[in-house]
Image: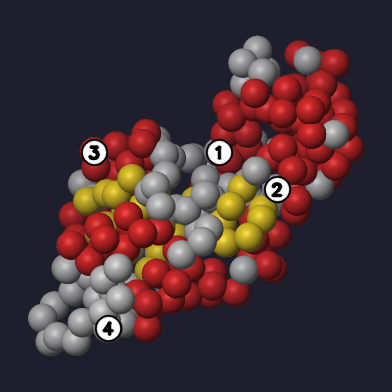
Amino acid sequence: MTDTPTTDAPVAYDVVVFDLGNVLIKWDPVEAIAQDVGVERARRFVNDPDFDFAGWNLLQDSGRSWEDAEAAAIASHPHYREEVLAYRNHFRHSIKEPVEGTEQILRELHAAGVPLVALTNWSAGMFPAALDRFDFLDLFDDIVVSGEEGVAKPDPAIFAILADRIRHLGSLDDALFVDDSLANVQGAIDAGLDAIAFTTAAELRADLHARGLPIKEA
């Protein structure tokens, strides 16, 4: 690796916006649900297209209460009652270690004075579990949590909220967005941001360096 570049040239972006789940924090709902029903049943539940776990969970990320979510799921899929209740009861097991390499990238950007914001699809009631566990979340100037706003990525409305929250830092046109979801990346591009589809920390580091951000080159 080379040292972080030292230059008086302006940083290429006013702010860098990070997704959290599976970009900075590994998330696996199977780990939580398996605490009560075992791994095999947990995987079957999460991957069952008839239930659509991702779609069900997105509604909580968009502001639906867990009480309403669980009641609706149990009413429509009563055979999954244990699985449904296990997820919230053991949610802390679904958030695992930091994604290898991206925490270091975040710390390098922060040390270089780059403004940082997080934009995450996360239910309001569950997000404190992440705040309690990961001190690197304190490096963000702001964290926009979809469940607190009542709308989730890639809905254009959440990017309008982001624009208002970063107004003191800059505009969406001068912001860079990093997310592992291609739908969210496209939503960001449609809203006017430059965006990177996250795959690995090494690829992200190369993309950030190529865009002129003050970060070590791999």
Measured Cα–Cα span from mark 2 to mark 3:
31 Å
Query: Which of the two marks, 3 or 4, is nearer to us in this view?
Result: 4
Whichever of labels 2 and 1 marks the residue nearer the N terminus, that label is 1
* Quadrant of the frame with the N terminus: bottom left
Instruction: Give the mark nearest the N terminus, 4 or 2.
Output: 4
Residue at the extreme front of the image, as rendered: 1
Q: Amino acid at mark 1?
A: Ser
Residue shown at the point (67%, 53%) measured from the top left: 95
Q: Amino acid at mark 2?
A: Ser
Number of numbered discs on residues: 4
Residue pointed to by mark 2: 94
**Figure quadrant of residue 210:** bottom left
Numbered disc 3: secondary structure: helix
- Of callouts 1 and 4, the N-terminal one: 4
Q: Measure the alpha-carbon separation of dots 1 and 3.
A: 20 Å
- Dividing the picture into quadrants, the one containing residue 25 is bottom right
Q: CA distance from mark 3 to mark 4?
A: 35 Å
What's the residue at 40%, 64% (across, down)? Answer: 117
- Name the residue tied to disc 4: 3
> Closer to us: mark 4 or mark 2?
4
User: From the viewer's perspective, is residue 86 above or below residue 103?
Assistant: above
User: Dots 1 and 4: beta carbons under 8 Å?
Assistant: no
| Residue hosting label 1 | 62
Q: Which residue is mark 3?
A: 190
* Label 2 – label 1 distance at C-alpha: 19 Å
In the rendered image, residue 73, in percent from the top left (x then y), is placed at 75, 22
Which residue type does callout 3 highlight? Asp
